[in-house]
């Protein structure tokens, strides 16, 4: 892969940018303290903004590396405070695989925001970073997360039994992926039909 680091990206409604330490208050208010958000995640809701601040500091430090990807999701019509995050949570450089994780404040659920952010980074990771496989997974008891993956063009591959851990304990993992040739084939088909590229 040709790692580029967390570069600023833009979609119709969103700006995807690097976190700053002064995002801590908005992050704490909008999602890190929200137990509905963290129900199916590996980390517990934050009790204080200082916990969020410490995490964001590690992200800010991580931006020194070109293989570190952690975006703040910012709504263009909602000021400059982030409402969620999307990131590469694991990778396999030998196989050019990137594993994506995301979370967004519950007040912004069911508005297509997460899928718009995911589609934006899919294009970047295939076209510029040269990933071959982008994958993600979710607890089957959290089906809305899977709907995001399907909307973004990922295909369901199967469910690994008791293969993950979260605030629910040991859980199953429903796995989805999209391959570079699938992405570029879809882009070519859509361009041929309409003369324009299209996002998943």
Image (cartoon, rainbow, N blue to C red):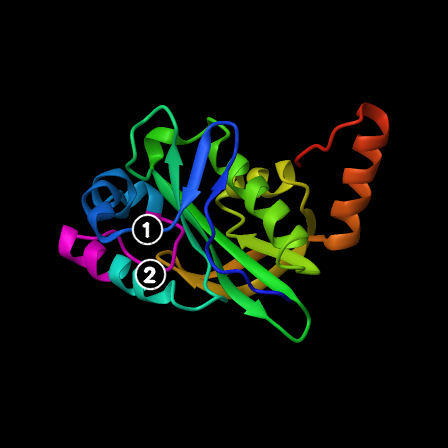
Position in image of residue 47 (x %, y %): 16, 52
Give above or below for 159 relative to 10.
below
Q: Is residue 191 left or right of residue 33?
A: right
The residue shown at (26%, 44%) is 27
Picture disc at residue 1: none
Q: Quadrant of residue 43?
A: bottom left
Q: Which residue is mark 1?
A: 19
Residue 48 counted in the magenta span: yes
Q: Position of residue 106 (x, y in %)?
A: 34, 34
Q: Quadrant of residue 187?
A: top right
On screen, residue 24 versus residue 180, left or right, reads left
Mark 1, other Cα within 10 Å: few <14 / some 14–19 / many ≥20: many
What residue do we see at 53% from left, 60% from top?
Answer: 4
175 relative to 118, above or below: below
**Residue at image x 32%, y 40%?**
82
Q: Residue at 67% x, 46% y: name it.
A: 154
Determine which residue is flagged by label 2.
59
Q: Nearer the viewer, residue 88 or 143?
A: 88
CB atoms of marks 2 and 1 within 8 Å: yes
User: Is residue 190 rendered to the left or right of residue 17?
Assistant: right
Helix, strand or loop at label 2? It is: helix
Is residue 177 found inside the magenta-colored segment of the image?
no
**Which contiguous range is marked in magenta?**
38-54
């Amino acid at each position: 892969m040709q790692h580029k680091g967390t570069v600023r990206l833009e979609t119709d409604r969103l700006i995807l940018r690097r976190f700053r330490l002064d995002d801590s208050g908005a992050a704490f208010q909008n999602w890190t303290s929200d137990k509905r958000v963290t129900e199916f995640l590996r980390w517990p809701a934050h009790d204080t903004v200082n916990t969020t601040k410490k995490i964001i500091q590690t992200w800010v430090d991580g931006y020194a590396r070109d293989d570190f990807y952690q975006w703040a999701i910012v709504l263009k019509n909602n000021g400059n405070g982030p409402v969620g995050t999307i990131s590469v949570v694991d990778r396999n450089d030998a196989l050019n695989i990137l594993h994506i994780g995301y979370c967004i404040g519950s007040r912004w659920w069911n508005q297509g925001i997460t899928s718009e952010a995911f589609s934006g980074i899919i294009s970047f990771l295939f076209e510029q970073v040269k990933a071959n496989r982008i994958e993600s997974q979710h607890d089957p008891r959290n089906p809305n997360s899977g709907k995001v993956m399907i909307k973004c063009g990922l295909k369901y591959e199967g469910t690994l039994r008791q293969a993950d851990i979260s605030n629910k304990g040991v859980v199953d993992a429903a796995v989805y992926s999209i391959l570079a040739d699938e992405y570029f084939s879809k882009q070519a088909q859509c361009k041929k039909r309409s003369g324009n590229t299209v996002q998943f």
